[in-house]
Amino acid sequence: MESGDGALSATSLDESITSFFTSAPPLKESDNLRERVMEFVELNSTIAAGDGGHRKVVCVTSGGTTVPLEQRCVRYIDNFSSGHRGATSAEYFVKAGYAVVFLHRRGTIMPYTRSLPEDPLLECLELDGDSSIRVRQSCSDAVKKSISDHHAAVAGNLLLKLPFTTIFEYLQMLQIIAKAMKPLGPLAMFYLAAAVSDFYVPWQTMAEHKIQSASGPLDMRLVQVPKMLAILRKEWAPLAFCISFKLETDSKILLEKADMALRKYKMHMVIANELLTRKEEVTVVTVDGKIPVYRDKSQPDSDVEQPLTELIRNKHSTYIKNTNR
Amino acid sequence: MESGDGALSATSLDESITSFFTSAPPLKESDNLRERVMEFVELNSTIAAGDGGHRKVVCVTSGGTTVPLEQRCVRYIDNFSSGHRGATSAEYFVKAGYAVVFLHRRGTIMPYTRSLPEDPLLECLELDGDSSIRVRQSCSDAVKKSISDHHAAVAGNLLLKLPFTTIFEYLQMLQIIAKAMKPLGPLAMFYLAAAVSDFYVPWQTMAEHKIQSASGPLDMRLVQVPKMLAILRKEWAPLAFCISFKLETDSKILLEKADMALRKYKMHMVIANELLTRKEEVTVVTVDGKIPVYRDKSQPDSDVEQPLTELIRNKHSTYIKNTNR
């Protein structure tokens, strides 16, 4: 096992993290959020799992964060992510018996909706005469499966959906969730698939009003978002199994950067994916080596998340056994 | 009537417009789009309207455009707009007998969906036993109205929905639509409610790969998007009735800026709205004066778009009569 200190505890990192949180606009209803997460975690931690232990809890993050450029926000920088990876993975984790805290960008793909059309309500429903509504035959099976799986997960306390928009909301919510999951020890897992902004405009230096376009080009200076993975591992939930993602468009630097992230932030796994091929294959980078994971191309509806989450479950089980030994 | 030339024909504007379009990534399936819009316009232009003339066509733009910061787009600057104004106004225009080309940001609010919950399919439907799906009682009326109004508009050729994401797509699509609507003369209207980026990164100067965060702050230079309103009025559809929107967070400069836009781009109306009060009131700025428009506060479900679109319809009718005289 890695130790929880060492290279991470640089004072400059601590300072930039403190500065980020103290300058961020306060999260709305943070007490209410904390209570909901703690209740969800406690409820699940008392439930026995099939393998003799207790139920595992995974926080899946999904979608991209935004960086406001103005305090009364009209313009912002966004990080592209449909949320497909997170939503699909959340479904497989629920199926495998995990309770899932789904920290997602508002408006991105939700678990159990990926087989539906883009505008499902208007596209899938029709009026039967003047009075009753029916589901179109072509959508019927997909809609039924979507609704019944979603309701089963929510009713079984296996899915808690929490939306964010800005980088400020995301990191404050992640901190609350991580601290609430800390008591779970190695039964907790973080599957950090969200596309988190690397740069932000500190709240105090931000324009209050809409930036005016009257005169010439716009020059902007953005500063780096401190790497919270370090403090997640060191303080928020030191025993949790942590998986981060590295997305690049340039395959030449991808594995090298994934490897660097693994060592620098003491992740248990880094999932390396390239923008163009990310739905076909990913590489799981661990200290013991690199494991390529492919979608089963012989099946038309297959996805790479199914073999990926299966591999992760196995590694997490081994981690729990080794940690409790 | 204003003349179609004069102050607008500055060579530098023409140059910056040419440079924008020649450097933009080519629009996908532009021929197909052109055909669909022309078919929609032609079909509607042969239909007689209640007032003895022919059916009017309005292009409603809605939602915000994005500015990519990288060619293989991971990060982009976005302009916030829920699309509520555009979607609601489109409904009223259809109700008033207009055919509506709804040029909207992918994923924003669509006409006939604003009374539904955020995640309507999962929230409104439930399984009745194991086999059939039913609409929850609490959503039933809203869902019925939404589906029947939407289907009536689409089946009656009164609504053509065209999605965009980037500023490059938006302006190329607007040009195609405007040129297809040009033959309608004064029966054509543009209701430009979309939040269009003021600044962009020219495609050639853009980073091909994801910008790396390793070393220090990020400095960016963005150049101004050329004001296409000028060329819309001058060349694309010179006889169309044109309404643009001005959104500011600072009320002190709002009306002055709206007035400036009216004169500079020869708009027939500029709708001035302030971020915080935009759902309660707007000011219609014309060369004849400023008309405040308020939501009817005595009605709980009222909106400002109803009186606004009514005022616009009247002004547009007068404009058609004056132009044809």
Image (cartoon, coloured by chain):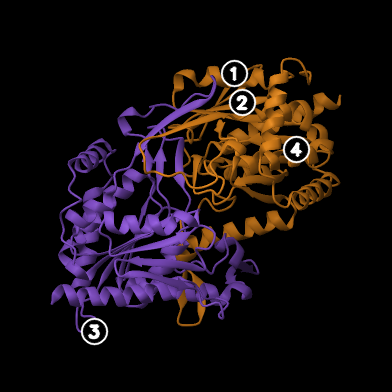
Chain colours: A orange, B purple
Q: Residue furthest left?
A: B325
| Residue ID at (72%, 24%) | A14
> Mark 4 Cα within 10 Å, few/some/many (few <14, many 20+)?
many
What subunit carries mark 1?
A
3D distance between C-alphas at marks 2 and 1: 8 Å
Tell me whether circle 1 and circle 4 mark residues in contact (CB < 8 Å).
no
- Number of the label disc, if any, that sits on residue A178: 4
Answer yes or no: is residue A137 visible.
Answer: no
Amino acid found under the numbered disc labelled 2: Val
Task: Tell me where residue B85 appears, x and y as whole percent.
Answer: 44, 63
> Mark 3 Cα within 10 Å, few/some/many (few <14, many 20+)?
few
**Considering the image in quadrants, where does the N terminus of chain A appear?**
top right
3D distance between C-alphas at marks 4 and 2: 18 Å
Q: Say which label, 1 or 4, has the lower sequence index.
A: 4
Residue picked out by circle 2: A270
Residue nearest the viewer, comparing B226 with A119: B226
Which quarter of the picture shows residue B62? bottom left
3D distance between C-alphas at marks 2 and 3: 66 Å
Query: Compared to A279, does B279 lie above or below?
Result: below
| Residue ID at (76%, 15%) | A6
Tell me whether circle 3 and circle 1 mark residues in contact (CB < 8 Å).
no
> Do marks 4 and 2 share a subunit?
yes
